[in-house]
Amino acid sequence: MPHDTLNAFCRDNNVSHRGAAQGPLQGLSFAAKDVFDVEGTRTGFGHPAWLETHPPATETAFAVTRLLEAGASLAGRTISDELCYSIAGENPHYGTPTNPRAPDRLPGGSSSGSAAATAGGLVDFALGTDCGGSVRVPASYCGLFGIRPTHGRIPLDGVSRFAPRFDTVGWFARDAAMLQRVGQVLLDGAAGAGFDRMIVLDDAFARADEPVRAALEPGLELIEAQLGAPTHMSLAPDGLDDWLETFRLTQAGEIWASLGEWITQARPVFGKGVGERFAAASKVTPEASTAARIRADAIATELDTRIGESDLLCLPTSPCIAPLRGTASDAVEIDYRRRTMALLCIAGLGGLPQLTIPLGTIDGAPVGLSIMARAGRDIELLDFAAKVFAHI
Amino acid sequence: MPHDTLNAFCRDNNVSHRGAAQGPLQGLSFAAKDVFDVEGTRTGFGHPAWLETHPPATETAFAVTRLLEAGASLAGRTISDELCYSIAGENPHYGTPTNPRAPDRLPGGSSSGSAAATAGGLVDFALGTDCGGSVRVPASYCGLFGIRPTHGRIPLDGVSRFAPRFDTVGWFARDAAMLQRVGQVLLDGAAGAGFDRMIVLDDAFARADEPVRAALEPGLELIEAQLGAPTHMSLAPDGLDDWLETFRLTQAGEIWASLGEWITQARPVFGKGVGERFAAASKVTPEASTAARIRADAIATELDTRIGESDLLCLPTSPCIAPLRGTASDAVEIDYRRRTMALLCIAGLGGLPQLTIPLGTIDGAPVGLSIMARAGRDIELLDFAAKVFAHI
């Protein structure tokens, strides 16, 4: 068999639904991560113990309903990392979805199956969620367009609760036009004025591997051709490590508040990495959590002050290509995760929309360039990508 | 939840594969009925007991491999009727897939999930098998184009064995162009001359409900516009009941030869109808089976003599629209099955290619018009449908 087993869809709790007969997405198919409720069926949240201990949903998630009503059909529910607490894309219970663009490498997570299904051509687009990077990372690793919208822009009704301060509903597509088309259904509101200043985030680029920086250069040139010579900026005056730590602690506190009680009672078995992160989250003191939240608020205010309405910020989605399969659970993992989260935490802390564009490959593995903007500028980001990166 | 649960895909043994990066079907997605082997995974043949008692396949089915190599991606394996011995589309173990075009009615079977997945827009096309009507019936009920190719035209390697004398690999699509495009990959050989005589099978039309005949009339007019005034013909001089009985006995004898040993040992629990048919098949004597085979050979010779190279035969795919859900297991079922099989058995006995075109609806439920031709004229049938019925 010369082809990849994609292992994208859930088996225990898969579900397919037909979309409305008429609508702007009529005839398209999509997949939804195993955190989106579908009435009458059980959401698994990436873990068989969660699936077993939770009743069928009584309502379908807002985003799924909106897409079905627009005419798209739900082809299936996709594998997620365990309770979403990973960006690797591994799942010890259900297996690791294949990265169709680099089968020897990880797909990225936690929206791993949605990325695999989209990149493998099983569906036209797919829903994921992005709290700490769970759409942006698999999009970058699998060579997809992906968006993490402004926090709060798309209702989280019917989505498994993880860290509500940062949770967002995002999606994947193979081209910018499809990403935009889905956005026209999921995002309410009209487009405002376009962007007129390109900002290159030097502190973010400095953290990327040199081949990644080189691979993203042509994308920066295309943006420059639209907006003129870029302004260079470093967002975090004291370095992104401070921001990363603030994000990590705030997120861990929220995660334990959402899931600690269930974990303590159900005692689920976790794979390496995920179990350790939950154990660490359980030990975050209320004092540390409060201090982190206060610092997070300050960073959000700072971002709000510094990023103008017409600014388009550019940064690498990930500092590196996808790790090889089987390596993410090694000691290497902690460093890799920290390096990656340092870039991802910016949008999380600011609640900012971030869109990743598949820009090239290194050793055959895809890398993504991100464009980011002020909160609320989702439609403008989608329009910009559809205009400038239509050729990909 | 205002939308249909399609229940198209297998849950226990679903599998997704990425197609080759290049090829004539690049970017398309397909589904395959739960009778197609995929290396390293278990085929279920529509029954959990079969799934449990059979090892993973060591090779991928010919048709699946051919499609993957052409660039199409396998989105999943679809629900089948139990061991394919039904045309209703019900499955008591896995549930009945939804007929997306008429949710209160049966989807038809045995390739029920493949039809539901295609009609519901989950995939671009889907593989089924057709022994006694298992592609033609669900295509007609679900408003799809579907083809049962010439017997032996597409290798059955890696397909669950049912009644080898009649088994074929077929497929579904929402439009004639897609049906043709898949045929260009699955069928070897070049197109011969087109058709120049339209034959309306009066004995077949006489068995259809009057509203079905009326609904198919516009299709006949389109064909007449291409080929001129039709010749009217009745194929079975002694009536189609004799043909039906010949088909039924020959098929039953073959089915018991293929599956009797396993059924006797594994004692699977069957739903109503299917269990009764297997019980009846077990009682077909060698003498009755041999007599039926001899008669079947004579009918095949007769068809071969009477159908010319350039003849296009027209008949209703099914004499009626899909039965309402929950009614097919009643006493009504036997009569319904006999009426339907009387039309379906013609292509079976002759090994002829038959293509069904979704032509209209009655009370909102689809009906199909079939075009049929001499053995080997598959490509010409596909080309004719793509030319004349491109508007559907």
Image (cartoon, coloured by chain):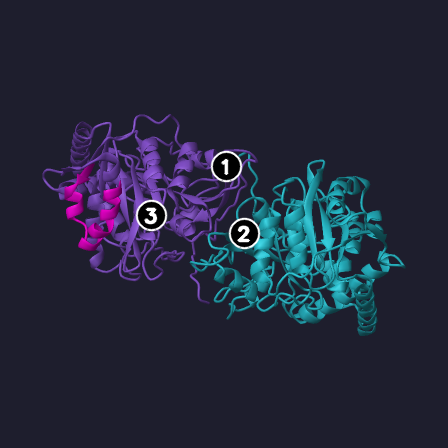
Chain colours: A cyan, B purple
Is residue A347 within the magenta segment? no
> Residue at label 3?
B139
Label 3, residues with CA under 10 Å away: few <14, some 14-19, many ≥20: many
Q: Residue at x 22, y 48 (%)?
A: B217
Q: Secondary structure at mark 3?
A: helix
Give residue A81's quadrant in the image. bottom right
Secondary structure mostly seen in the magenta stretch = helix
For the question of whether residue A109 can be seen, the reply is no
Name the one closer to the observer, A203 or B92. A203
Of the two numbered discs 3 and 1 on the same chain, state the one appearing first in sequence.
1
Q: How far, Cα to Cα, is label 3 from label 2? A: 26 Å
> Residue at label 1?
B68
Is residue B216 within the magenta segment? yes
Query: In the image, are marks 3 and 2 on the same chain?
Result: no
Q: How far, Cα to Cα, is label 3 from label 1? A: 23 Å
Disc 1, disc 2: CB below 8 Å? no
Q: Which chain does the residue under circle 1 lie in?
A: B
Q: Which chain does the residue under circle 2 lie in?
A: A
Q: Amino acid at mark 2?
A: Phe
Q: Which chain does the residue under circle 3 lie in?
A: B
